[in-house]
Amino acid sequence: MHKLTVLSGGMGGARFLQGLLHAITTGRLPGVDPDAEVTVVANTADDLWIHGLKVCPDLDTVMYTLGDGIDPGRGWGRRDETWSVKEELATYGVEPTWFGLGDRDIATHLVRTQMLDAGYPLSQVTEALCKRWNPGVTLLPMTDDRVETHIAITDPDTPSGRRVVHFQEYWVRLRAEVPAETVVVVGLDDATPAPGVIDAITDADLVLLPPSNPVVSVGTILGVPRVREALAATTAPVVGLSPIVGGTHVRGMAEQMLTSIGVEVSASGVGLHYGARPNGGVLDGWLVDTADAAEVDRVTAAGIACRAVPLMMTDVDATAAMAAAAVELARESAQR
Ligand code: GDP
Ligand code: CA
């Protein structure tokens, strides 16, 4: 296998990619070339405009993580960050104050916004930013079009009793602590896949769904027109790794999002939600954590090859082992 394509969100996807690249370069993946090419199709539905700047959290988390510029403690934003601009803006009383843009990070958003203003599409801007970070993958936004996830929440202070907030406001300001009633991805139905996205899936030797949020990360990528069709058509096996371990999301907000779309919060629940490729779904294989070994039969019965292996991304070695298990499962399902 030479061409690997990963459909990624932010933190979960980026950590998995770190392990995958480590596994490739150390020759730990059976049947995968040590110089294999990895293409990442990243979610852009979390993107927002703030203080006049275009911010792309998932693209940046992948770029900074793989380019060794990430703040390892927070898992997002830049290492050795300072916050002078944020403090100055707060002193002016400028809203919103809940979204933290660090000084170093702002440089990225300035470059991006300037290039977008000059007419370059997000995919070309991302390519330009990656020249500095050398992430070791080809990083593609899922689309060059504006797509935004919005969350409907209950708000007794409004006449309708509901309010719709941008995904980032739900996650960062409200800390996903109020129930999400509905997830609406504005602009998704009319989006066009960014250049290279469909080919990356169609021409791949292996497609991986990392343990990213199945609703607001992988779900939005799958919602871009033609992406599901490309997954159905590719000759590559498609293997995913569960973001739910022992009935919880480890870190993040997958539980809230799955509940809002009526999907059971379990490793098998997510696997069945993605579905088996021969039945109109996207998966040939699905890895669950050893804590969820009892759910393997349920996934297998749905026509998806399934194994239970440790899925906690505690360090790069543990994550590399997850990548190796995904490749093994892909090879088995390709032989069937
Ligand atoms: P985000 O865009 O930053 O939210 O990142 P992703 O969508 O790529 O991934 C977030 C999801 O990763 C979370 O909702 C968790 O379900 C999952 N996750 C985080 N850490 C782990 C881990 O160590 N193991 C597994 N299996 N899933 C994890
Ligand atoms: Ca995200």
Image: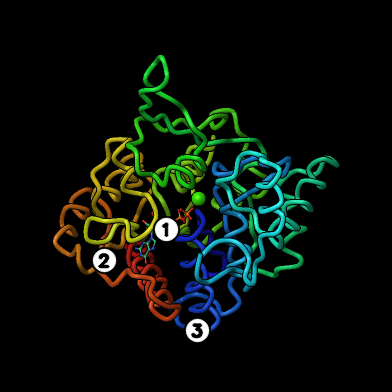
On screen, residue 225 above or below 249: above
Residue 155 quadrant = top left
On the image, the x and y values in percent for residue 223 come to 48, 37
- Mark closer to the observer (2, 3): 2
The numbered dot on residue 128 is none
How crowded pointer 3 is (Cα within 10 Å; few <14, some 14-19, many 20+) is rated as some
Q: Position of residue 210 (x, y in %)?
A: 43, 59
Residue 27 is labelled as 3
Q: Is residue 278 visible?
A: no
Q: Quadrant of residue 314?
A: bottom left
Q: Which amino acid type is marked by label 2? A: Asp
Please give the residue where the numbered disc 2 appears in the rendered image.
289
Residue 69 seen in the current view:
yes
Mark sitting on residue 237: 1
Q: Residues within 10 Å of mark 2 (few under 14, many from 20)?
A: many
Q: Nearer the viewer, residue 286 or 84?
A: 84
CA gap between label 2 and label 3 equals 24 Å
